[in-house]
Image (tube, helix red, strand yellow):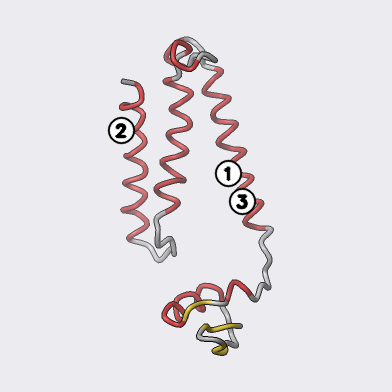
């Protein structure tokens, strides 16, 4: 029953994140942030609430007398967010390969990556 409750509760922020993003100009065509970011964060935190030692053999969660498990889950979520942010910031800023796209997706991708000089080579557009 906990899994159904967890899934139902995690669906709300994900759904409202999808609605909010649709009203903005943010480029998240697959809605990864709303689906995986918000839903995954809420799901991971709620795991610290609903965990039962009888099922997982390791530790109980907040509802079963172990509030420390929620802290452990929160630390894990925070470390995943920080790691993702650092790795995103470390991506190469001047990479030619990221501007190599198929002709039909050229306009959107070029705008996203601010490619300035492109040429057609072997059926693909390259920087």
Are dots 1 and 3 in contact, CB under 8 Å? yes
Q: Which disc, if any, is residue 95?
A: none
Q: Mark 2, residues whose alpha carbon is within 10 Å: few (<14), some, or many (≥20)?
A: few
Please tell me whether mark 3 sits on a helix, a strand or a loop: helix
* Whether residue 11 is situated above or below residue 5 in the rendered picture: below
Residue at left offset 54%, top offset 89%: 120
Q: Position of residue 42 (x, y in %)?
A: 43, 35
* Whether residue 29 is situated above or below residue 69 in the rendered picture: below
The residue wearing badge 1 is: 81
Residue at left offset 32%, top offset 39%: 12
Q: Which disc, if any, is residue 8?
A: 2
First in sequence: mark 2 vs mark 3: 2
The residue wearing badge 3 is: 85
For the residues labelled 2 and 3, the Cα–Cα distance comes to 28 Å
Q: Position of residue 11 (x, y in %)?
A: 33, 39
Please tell me whether mark 2 sits on a helix, a strand or a loop: helix
For the residues labelled 1 and 3, the Cα–Cα distance comes to 6 Å
Please tell me whether mark 1 sits on a helix, a strand or a loop: helix
Drawn side of residue 20 relative to residue 61, left or right: left
Residue at left offset 48%, top offset 10%: 65
Q: Mark 1, residues whose alpha carbon is within 10 Å: few (<14), some, or many (≥20)?
A: few
């Amino acid at each position: 029953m906990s899994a159904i409750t967890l899934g139902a509760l995690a669906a709300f922020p994900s759904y409202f994140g999808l609605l909010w993003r649709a009203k903005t100009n943010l480029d998240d065509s697959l809605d990864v942030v709303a689906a995986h970011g918000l839903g995954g964060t809420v799901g991971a935190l709620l795991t610290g609430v609903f965990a039962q030692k009888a099922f997982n053999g390791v530790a109980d969660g907040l509802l079963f007398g172990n509030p420390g498990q929620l802290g452990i889950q929160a630390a894990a979520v925070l470390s995943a967010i920080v790691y993702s942010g650092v790795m995103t910031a470390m991506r190469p800023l001047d990479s030619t390969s990221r501007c190599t796209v198929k002709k039909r997706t050229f306009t959107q991708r070029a705008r996203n990556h601010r490619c300035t000089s492109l040429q057609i080579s072997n059926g693909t557009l390259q920087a």
